[in-house]
Image: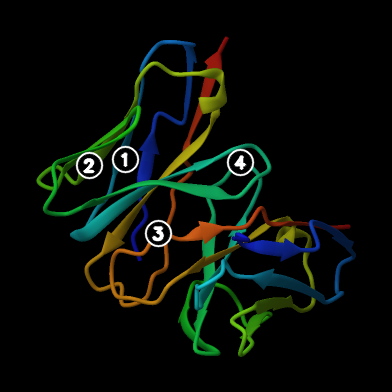
Amino acid sequence: DAGVTQSPTHLIKTRGQQVTLRCSPKSGHDTVSWYQQALGQGPQFIFQYYEEEERQRGNFPDRFSGHQFPNYSSELNVNALLLGDSALYLCASSLAGYGFQPQHFGDGTRLSIL
Amino acid sequence: SQQGEEDPQALSIQEGENATMNCSYKTSINNLQWYRQNSGRGLVHLILIRSNEREKHSGRLRVTLDTSKKSSSLLITASRAADTASYFCAPRQNNNAGNMLTFGGGTRLMVKP
């Protein structure tokens, strides 16, 4: 039973470029969340997708956008990259249900902006 | 949204000792989760405690919750070198209709062999 998989594992971009990160949720899960984790800090919630729509959003600018496909996989897009976007981007999946749903995380994509 | 604040920021102990880390939060919750993160990896869910529970055990882990003090603690007994990781708490507010998690800066635990 495959867990959450993310691609690519590492990525190097320059300022102003655009990037797309991908996530496949754990088998049976229908909800995908994205987090940004700067070095030495805790993960910060970006947004969550359910039924192909953005259900919740954290305090991130519109440069950060996403998509969820019918097979529940998801993409995170970041436009006009800034040096401060350098971070580990984590995808987490869960099964929809109000309340007590642990999230399963992938190992992330390490994004470096030069 | 609310996040937990973990304390201490860093903890170094010898193998076999117990490790205790604490989490404080500000508003009412319906549950609180603890996660572990090994260096360079994703987070792993450890345990969830509901607001009507006071203590929960899972293997060598013991979690307590004091809603009157808005705090939780995670105890790892008989620690091992493999327990070296960062630990995060994620309090979940009552009005959190989705499933977003909010994290503090975590406690970095080092267990020396």
Q: Secondary structure at mark 2?
A: strand
Q: Which mark is residue A40?
A: 4
Residue B82's x, y, as percent? Answer: 56, 25
Q: Say whether residue B90 is left or right of residue B57.
A: right
Residue hosting label 1: B23
Q: Secondary structure at mark 1?
A: strand
Q: Are marks 1 and 4 on the same chain?
A: no
Q: Which corner quadrant of the image does residue B76 belong to?
A: top left
Structural distance between the alpha carbons of marks 2 and 3: 20 Å
Task: Answer above or below: position of B70 versus A46.
Answer: above
Q: Amino acid at mark 3?
A: Pro
- Are the residues tagged 1 and 2 within 8 Å (C-beta)? yes
Quick check: B113 above or below A11? Answer: above
Q: Are marks 1 and 4 in contact (CB under 8 Å)?
A: no
Q: Is residue B69 above or below residue A76?
A: above
Looking at the image, is mark 3 or mark 1 nearer the viewer?
3
Residue at image mark 3: A102
Task: Identify which residue is drawn at 37% across, 76% down.
Answer: B98
Residue B11, percent across and down?
46, 22
Look at the image and tell me in which quarter the C terminus of chain A lies.
bottom right
Q: Residue drawn at (69%, 78%), measured in percent from left and top?
A: A75
Mark 1 nearby-residue class (10 Å; few <14, some 14–19, many ≥20): many
Q: Read off the chain for label 1.
A: B
Q: Nearer the viewer, residue A107 or B86?
A: A107
